[in-house]
Image: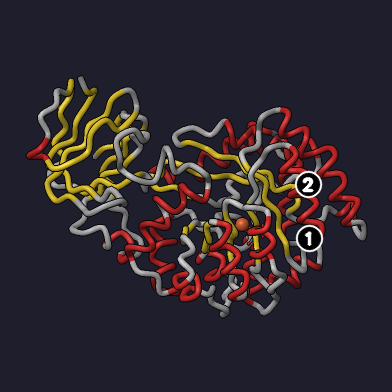
Amino acid sequence: MHDAVWVHARLAPMVGPVIRDGALATAAGRISWVGERCDWNGDARVEHDARGAWILPGFVDCHTHLVYAGSRAHEFELRLQGASYEDIAKAGGGIISTVRATRAASEAELLSLAQRRLRSWLAEGAAVVEVKSGYGLDRDTELKMLRAARRLEGVVVKTTFLGAHALPEEYKGRADAYIDFVCDEVLPAAAAEKLVDAVDAFCERIAFTRHQTARLFETAKRLGLPVKLHADQLSDLGGAALAAKHGALSADHLEYTSEAGIDALARAGSVAVLLPGAYYFLRETRLPPISALRSHHVPIALATDHNPGSSPLSSPLLAMNMACTLFRLTPEEALAGFTVQAARALGMQASHGTLQAGKAADFALWEIDSPAELAYAIGANPCVGRVRAGKSVLST
Ligand code: DI6
Ligand code: FE
């Protein structure tokens, strides 16, 4: 006996062909059957008529900085007057200004701010959201951020430790000592509290070197934690190759990655996570190497990179549109980027990203004529239903 079945649905399972008159059943929070409606002869306690709506796997946003306090709207104004993102960071603004506000906020305040932000993802049928720390840069605030992230409701949350996001003011001129502190105290404390699903770093001229990043990755390995990396966003520091060398789940941004770096990602089986929101908002002009990623068969995921400084973007749908418009991804690649490939970038391919029996019953219903419409439209939200662990949590 199945718990529920959705019939008269059009299904985009994100693996295999689409099904134009399908049925999808759930049992005990998982998908228990998917296929052509004419082949469905199971028993389900409840039958839902999808009335021709498309069902897709719930979106997986595999790169966000959703937990933080404060606003950076004034920096946006400064940039519009000509200041660069790097200028602002060097002058003590940027990430560090969000660190000040986040240190001053309580865990409850951080949770309530992030929970409010999360509404847009829920309205667009998201199933999984990754959330990074990295606006604490001290032990207590990093842990506070991760605890707040773990308490978010409505989606599956994956937490990533990003203690090596920027150099805090108290360590000015002592980046190596800060990395020692992160490796010896902060990351082990977060891991001991079981708050960490993966470890990330910002490897960049304005952040940490390859060598410092490698030291952090060694610590992650000792703690049995997978790694990912903010790589080659503003310059080519060889971040992608470094991530690949450490078997990273993903290397993210990649605007400046060389072909050798892409080859290394392909060999390591790491996912390339592209972040068009940051490219757009910082008015970057250097495109990530899409054709090389394709020719080397590197899986391409997309994410919002939601953060207050470089990508205040709260819409997976808009990120997909930007990926097509700015990066020339196909709508099919964009959809895969927010489902099957994003699940891989979080090591969740066994439970999310496709509509297949055995996976979590986390999916969304859309009133559209074809899945490509999700990447095509700007500012519309045709999500008409969201199912989480087999239960309908949004329907209109
Ligand atoms: N790269 C980014 O684009 C964000 N973090 C990072 O490592 C920016 C975060 C911020 O400006 O607050
Ligand atoms: Fe980021």
Residue 161, given in percent of the width and then of the height, sits at 68, 44
Q: Tell me the SS state at disc 2.
A: loop
The residue that label 1 is drawn on is 208
Q: Residues within 10 Å of mark 2 (few under 14, many from 20)?
A: many
**Residue type (three-letter) at the residue carrying disc 2:** Leu
Using the image as rendered, state which of residue 59 and residue 188 is in the foreground: 188
Residue 177 against residue 239 in the figure, above or below = above
Residue drawn 67% across the image and 33% down it = 107
Residue drawn 77% across the image and 62% down it = 210
Report the side of 46 relative to 105 (left or right): left
Residue 106, given in percent of the width and then of the height, sits at 70, 34
Residue drawn 56% across the image and 61% down it = 267
Closer to the chain start, of discs 2 and 1, is: 2
Residue 174, given in percent of the width and then of the height, sits at 92, 56
The residue that label 2 is drawn on is 137
Label annotation for residue 95: none
Report the side of 209 relative to 47 (left or right): right
- Figure quadrant of residue 359: top left
